[in-house]
Image (tube, rainbow, N blue to C red):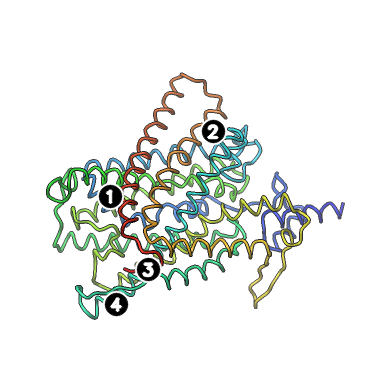
């Protein structure tokens, strides 16, 4: 019996990388129904993970998106995609366990859910799309974080030398500093140990969003305000006819992509306690997070558009829609940096886990893969695993180098996001729900789900076209490793 417990204990260390204290509890019999240490997540920790993922720096660009669409269409698109995201996220919540959403076998990752419900071919397609999306987002986060760091430097420069001063600074040193810091953070083993970082990141997202909203509100009251119209930027005045079309496509895609978080939903749900049922708790977390997201999206988008009108910037804080008070701009950008440090880990954990689970199944007896070495620094206790240390360090270095080499990658990120939005956020959740609930073809419910999927496919296609047009401009203007702002 004792050797069986030790064997199970070693397997858990290899597979999930939990710290030594939790492993001892698992060996003493404090296990969930799947033999893993008891999960402790609640509706609030799950909400924090989701908010960290969706209330990101993209909300500061919503004023630009609303400016392209106008008051009526802009607000409508935000509400429509918030509703779609909530609906498909709740469909996905029922796919965590299969075949029964309450008592069935657990799916630990999004890809595992696709494999068990839809089969191996869909699993391969999902893996390709999901991992491309994750890598693209992480590169985008690296660029965005360095942009906020440079914005702090530029803010002080403008404050001292005037708003017309040629304040240009390289992003590369900041990307390198970020990469070094993320190497340390990436040693956090898994989502179970990430709740504190997600909570801090969620607080930061509320902070800089509130700063953007407050500054926009102050400008609306005191002026000067930009010219805002029902249809957004005007053809022949602000933009050409073809430019208007590309901008509308990009704006719709930005809003849709800003709402999506399906790629981490199963990982978040796997942190929840077994009772009450995980799918019910996850649906509550979805409602809390998306309601919060929608309020902030509308406030940032509408107040930002009211403040700047059709000349709204891509990012109110880093694009210098505001110059003063410079200390408040700096505080907002510091909050963006802290938030993205946490978001980087939330998005990266599924990628880390994929290779580590594969290695644990192939090399379960390898000390390099399986053994955790406990370390104590004062009262801080943690453990090191050589696979985790080397693999995650190499991954972060590659992401950092790619971000430095391709300063136009924000356009590439938009393209990858547009390609991934429909399959990950809509198609796979809908198809898994149809398969699990055994919904017959050509029934009213089946037609409704297919119409929803088709609509989102068209939006994703339009966003991809807008991204390709932006990428074409970026390719002509880019200078690798010479990214300055």
Residue that carries the numbered disc 3 in the rendered image: 482
The quadrant holding residue 447 is top left
Residue 3: image x %, image y %?
A: 86, 54
Residue that carries the numbered disc 4 in the rendered image: 156
Residue 432, numbered label: 2
Quadrant location of the C terminus?
Answer: bottom left
Give the Cα distance between marks 2 and 3: 45 Å
Give the Cα distance between marks 3 and 4: 22 Å
Give the mark nearer the N terminus: 3 vs 4: 4
Give the mark nearer the N terminus: 2 vs 4: 4
Residue 78: image x %, image y %?
A: 32, 44
**Label 4: few (<14), some (14–19) or many (≥20) C-alpha neighbours in 10 Å:** some
> Outermost residue toward the top?
442
Residue that carries the numbered disc 1 in the rendered image: 65
Write the residue at 53% across / 44% down: 128
Give the Cα distance between marks 4 and 1: 28 Å
Which mark's residue is nearer the viewer, 3 or 4? 3
Give the Cα distance between marks 3 and 1: 28 Å
> Does the CB distance between marks 2 and 4 fall below 8 Å?
no
Write the residue at 45% across / 56% down: 52
Q: For this rendering, which residue is in front, 277 or 34?
A: 34
């Amino acid at each position: 019996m004792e050797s069986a417990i030790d064997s199970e204990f070693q397997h858990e260390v290899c597979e999930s990388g939990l710290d030594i204290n939790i492993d001892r509890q698992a060996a003493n019999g404090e296990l969930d129904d799947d033999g893993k240490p008891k999960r402790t997540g609640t509706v609030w920790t799950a909400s924090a993970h989701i908010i960290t993922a969706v209330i990101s720096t993209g909300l500061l660009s919503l004023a630009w998106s609303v400016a392209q669409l106008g008051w009526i269409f802009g607000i409508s698109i935000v509400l429509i995609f918030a509703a779609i995201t909530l609906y498909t996220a709740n469909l996905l919540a029922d796919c965590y366990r299969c075949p029964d959403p309450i008592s069935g076998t657990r799916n630990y990752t999004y890809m595992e859910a696709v494999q068990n419900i839809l089969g191996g071919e869909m699993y391969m397609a999902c893996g390709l799309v999901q991992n491309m999306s994750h890598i693209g987002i992480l590169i985008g986060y690296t660029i965005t974080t360095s942009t906020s760091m440079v914005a702090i430097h530029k803010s002080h420069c403008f404050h001292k030398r005037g708003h017309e001063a040629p304040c240009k600074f390289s992003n590369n040193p900041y990307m390198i500093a970020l990469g070094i810091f993320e190497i340390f953070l990436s040693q956090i083993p898994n989502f179970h140990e990430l709740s504190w970082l997600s909570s801090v990141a969620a607080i930061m997202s509320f902070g800089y969003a509130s700063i953007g909203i407050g500054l926009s509100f102050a400008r609306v009251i005191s002026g000067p305000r930009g010219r805002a119209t029902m249809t957004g930027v005007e053809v022949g005045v602000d933009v050409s006819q073809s430019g208007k079309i590309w901008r509308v496509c990009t704006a719709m895609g930005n809003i849709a992509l800003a709402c999506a978080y399906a790629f981490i939903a199963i990982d978040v749900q796997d942190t929840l306690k077994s009772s009450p049922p995980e799918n019910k708790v996850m649906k509550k977390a979805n409602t809390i997070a998306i309601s919060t997201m929608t309020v902030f999206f509308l406030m940032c988008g509408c107040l930002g558009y009211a403040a700047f009108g059709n000349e709204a910037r891509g990012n109110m804080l880093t694009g210098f829609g505001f110059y003063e008070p410079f200390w408040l701009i700096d505080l907002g950008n510091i909050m963006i940096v802290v938030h993205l440090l946490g978001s980087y880990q939330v998005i990266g954990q599924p990628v880390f886990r994929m290779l580590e689970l594969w290695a644990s199944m192939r090399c379960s007896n390898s000390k390099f893969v399986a053994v955790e070495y406990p370390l104590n620094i004062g009262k801080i206790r943690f453990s090191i695993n050589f696979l985790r240390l080397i693999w995650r360090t190499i991954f972060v270095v590659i992401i950092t180098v790619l971000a430095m080499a391709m300063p136009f990658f924000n356009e590439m990120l938009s393209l990858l996001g547009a390609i991934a939005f429909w399959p990950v956020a809509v198609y796979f959740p809908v198809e898994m729900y149809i398969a699990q609930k055994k919904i017959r073809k050509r029934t009213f419910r089946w037609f409704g789900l297919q119409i929803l999927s088709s609509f989102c496919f068209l939006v994703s296609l339009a966003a991809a076209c807008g991204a390709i047009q932006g990428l074409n401009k970026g390719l002509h203007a880019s200078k690798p490793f010479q990214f300055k702002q």
